[in-house]
Image (cartoon, grey):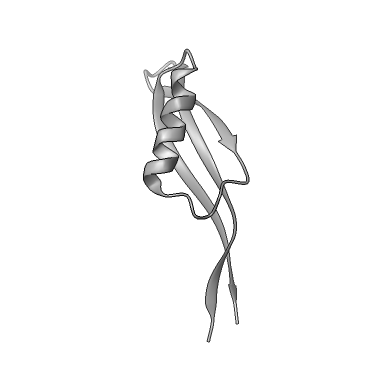
Amino acid sequence: MAQEVIKKMSLQVVFVSGEDEYGGAVCTTKTFNNINQQATAEELWTVAKGIASLQTLPLDAVNKVQTNSIEE
């Protein structure tokens, strides 16, 4: 039977860095790799808010990026 296995996880913290000529948001992303696979959404949110508090740009989004493989 096949199963899904987490290979790596990273945290992306997205900031609004300006506007384009059409008024749309231009974003900058900071990516933190090797995130503990057992980290909860609440823990990741807390870390992202802490990182955002050290930045001058406003926080736009927090993303958890997970790479999985399917193995037998």
Q: Quadrant of the C terminus?
A: bottom right
Percent position of residue 70, x then y: 57, 73
User: Is residue 15 in view from this perspective?
Assistant: no
User: Is residue 52 in view from this perspective?
Assistant: yes
Number of numbered discs:
0
Percent position of residue 13, x then y: 48, 32
Percent position of residue 14, x then y: 47, 30
20 versus 37 height, above or below: above
7 versus 47 height, above or below: below
**In front of the other: 69 or 44:** 44
Percent position of residue 54, x then y: 49, 17
Q: Is residue 24 left or right of residue 1?
A: left
Residue appearing at x 58%, y 36% in the figure: 31
Q: Residue farthest to the top?
A: 56
Res 58 quadrant in image: top left
**In front of the other: 18 or 63:** 63
47 versus 43 height, above or below: above
**In front of the other: 34 or 15:** 34
Residue appearing at x 47%, y 49% in the figure: 39
Res 22 quadrant in image: top left
Residue appearing at x 44%, y 19% in the figure: 53
Residue appearing at x 56%, y 30% in the figure: 30
Q: Residue farthest to the bottom?
A: 1
